[in-house]
Amino acid sequence: MAFMTGNDEGFEVIVVGAGLVGLAAAAFLAQHGVRVLAVDRHPATSAHPKARLVNVRSMEIYRALGVEEEVRAAGEPNSGFDIVDTLAGPLRSWIAAPADEVAAAGLSPTTPYSCDQQRLEPILLRRARELGATVAFGTSAELVEIGSDDVTVELSSDDRTRAVHSQFLVAADGARSAVRDRLGITLRGEDVEGESVSSVFRADLEPALRGRQINAVMCRAANAFLFARGNKDDRSWQLGTFLRPGWAELAPAELGTRLTEVIRAATGLPDLRPVIEDTARWRTGAYVADRFRAGPVFLVGDAAHVMPPYGGFGGNTGVQDAHNLTWRLAAACRREDDTEALLAGYETERRPVAELMVAQALLRSRKKPGQAPVPGEIDATTLVLGLRYGGPPEDPANPSGRPGTRAPHVLLRDGRSTLDLLRPTSFTVIDVEAIGPLVDPVHRARWDATYGSGPPVRPDGIIGRSVSSMLFK
């Protein structure tokens, strides 16, 4: 759907880019009651699987958005990462399923999950529109003017162009962000050597699996990765490998033949006839933007930071950028007190997180398959649940309750989580006298350390410092 009709004066925020992060931002803004327009030059949501792991913090965010069960229906539990000679041979665990650690320590009411990006984006699109967002595909956007308190964007679709104005703009237009370039913001970091190729295919791999469930494997005999895609009701596979010498010049049909050979080597099934549905070539790097903001324009996701895919941090970090930013924009649109300090807090909090996540992804990209954690590597659960704005990550099993940390999951006797008591569109102070007696004894120490003093909790689920005109600084 192209956006070329209607009154453009009603939009408070324009989101440029309607991929995973842009759609999440649009949905969060609409949930806050903000009049938001999201546009994307592509004709529809992504056709390539791209990101698959939805980490536990993102699942908590989707729970608050009201789409957790849809995400689960579209995906499947994450079973970790194995290393093999071929898929037909014995599996050896490399990275355990992240849900195991989360569940064992009772860290969350939900778990990490696997849901391919091309399945997740339509869920976020539906929810964004359901909440009142306008989302238009097949529409390019050019930032043409930045005022002190507004922006002007030129939208082009179906050979027609028009100017649209808004108070704020969120740039979610990817690693090659045109908005970032227009602002003169540079990325600093380094390339990851080499070019990769991935191929989505369908094939019956049961002769190699023999009833075993896999999520991702490194197949040493083929120097390639295999990833399960979809779920048991609609299974496809993805091969990931490096671009071999001479492949860059091959015609699509001949490249398909070469990829088929690699798929056969990876699976250990020499007579396999895979049906290749989509192929993509890509490079990556480890970069962070010098700034995440220029006046009323904010960068999120790959527009703000680029990281290797190892660890599955990229898409999740982008969604969590949007979650941190959008409640601030909503407050600014309502003209809350101390708006400038609130907006400045986005970059202050999220840029150090981006630097940490990029560094951790880069560290993982340099490891050999099957290698144990290396010095400086922080486990994923600590990174996503123990995150602390303004300080190093802490042990999520023993949260401190300090400002800047995630409000933790505490189990109540009736089976609810304290996270389900937090309001996603306003600030929350839990009634200690009313809720305290309901706390499950197993989680009493966690309650006392975090909620026992009645701290304010921001709309993004982060413990704040104080209450002032309903803003937590």
Image (cartoon, rainbow, N blue to C red):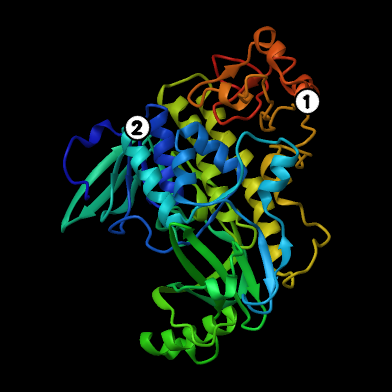
| Image position, residue 119 (x, y; %) | 41, 53
Q: CA distance from mark 2 to mark 1?
A: 37 Å
Secondary structure under tag 2 reads loop
Asked whether the viewer can see residue 298, the reply is no
The residue that mark 2 highlights is: 131
The vertical placement of 435 against 166, above or below, is above
Is 394 placed left or right of 203 in the picture? right
Kindly indicate whether the residue at mark 1 contacts the one at mark 2 (C-beta within 8 angstroms).
no
Q: Indicate which label's residue lies in the foreground, 2 or 1.
A: 1
Q: Residue 442 shows which numbered tag?
A: 1
Asked whether the viewer can see residue 11, the reply is yes
Disc 2 residue type (three-letter): Leu
Is 224 placed left or right of 453 in the picture? left
Residue lying at 42% horizontally and 27% vertically, measured from the top left: 32
Residue lying at 66% horizontally and 26% vertically, measured from the top left: 463
Q: Residues within 10 Å of mark 1 (few under 14, many from 20)?
A: few
Secondary structure under tag 1 reads helix
Is 421 placed left or right of 297 in the picture? right
Q: What is the quadrant of the C terminus in the image? A: top right
| Image position, residue 405 (x, y; %) | 69, 32
Disc 1 residue type (three-letter): Val
* Residue 24 found in image quarter: top left
* Residue 59 found in image quarter: top right
The vertical placement of 458 against 165, above or below, is above
| Image position, residue 333 (x, y; %) | 40, 27
The vertical placement of 471 against 289, above or below, is above
Query: In the displayed image of the protein, which residue is found farthest to the top?
Result: 433
Query: Disc 2 or 1, which lies upstream in sequence?
Result: 2
The vertical placement of 362 against 244, above or below, is above
